[in-house]
Amino acid sequence: MFRASLLAGNAAASPKVYNRLVTAPGPGTVFPTNQLRTEDGRPAPRTTRETLYALFHTECPTSELGWPYLERLRRIGEGKGLEVVGVSQDGPEETTAYLARLGVAAQVLYDPPPWKASETLQLSSVPALARVGADGVLQELVLGFQRATMEGLAARAAQLSGRPAGRFFLPEENVPAVRPG
């Protein structure tokens, strides 16, 4: 009897779903640049070339791991190649301090609460990389940090900038060996 009354009491409340399966927008979708803001709150300018938008959060360890590689991509694509633009889910003050600590010189835009651009992309976590054509159309959406994807983006940045691709990650022989103590 007691159990039945508890269940009856909870039956009226609708459950919240936190782990719903969603499908991220695919290639051909217009990237939500209009929902991004500059540091002073103005709408983000439209880009005129292929751009990699790197959505991140300053307290995300994987975002921090990825930024040195994104900065390397930015340098490969400098000029007329692939442009790399950070999209912070935090405010300008903490974002500026975070990027300065990491040595990042990339342009940064903001996806302020309630994170409309992230919601439009149906993101539930960061980092996320959105490669967008000069026409503003999504070419590729990557969730998380993936070595093969980063190598592919580096090759694309080199191709667009007219630079040789080279190796994006250090060869294994340059990684210091761990010696048993």
Image (spheres, rainbow, N blue to C red):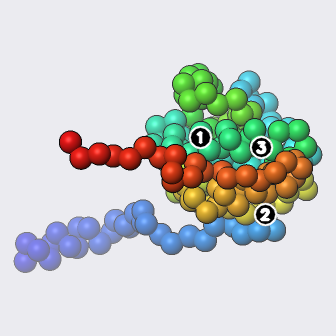
Residue on which the image places disc 1: 67
Task: Look at the numbered disc 3 and give the secondary structure of its residue.
Answer: helix
- Vertical arrangement, residue 65 with respect to residue 38, above or below: below
| Residue at 62% over, 44% down | 69
Q: Nearer the viewer, mark 2 or mark 1?
A: 1
Q: Is residue 50 visible?
A: no
CB atoms at circles 1 and 3 under 8 Å apart?
no
Counting residues from the N terminus, which is met first, the one under dot 3 or under dot 2?
A: 3
Decide which of 167, 113 is in the foreground and name it: 167
Q: Is residue 11 visible?
A: yes
| Residue at 47% over, 46% down | 175
Marks 1/3: CA–CA distance: 14 Å
Quadrant that contains the C terminus: top left
The part of the image, by quadrant, that contains residue 136 is: bottom right
What kind of residue is marked 3? Answer: Ile
Decide which of 49, 136 is in the foreground and name it: 49
- Vertical arrangement, residue 82 with respect to residue 20, above or below: above
- 2 left or right of 44 in image: left
Residue 46, numbered circle: none
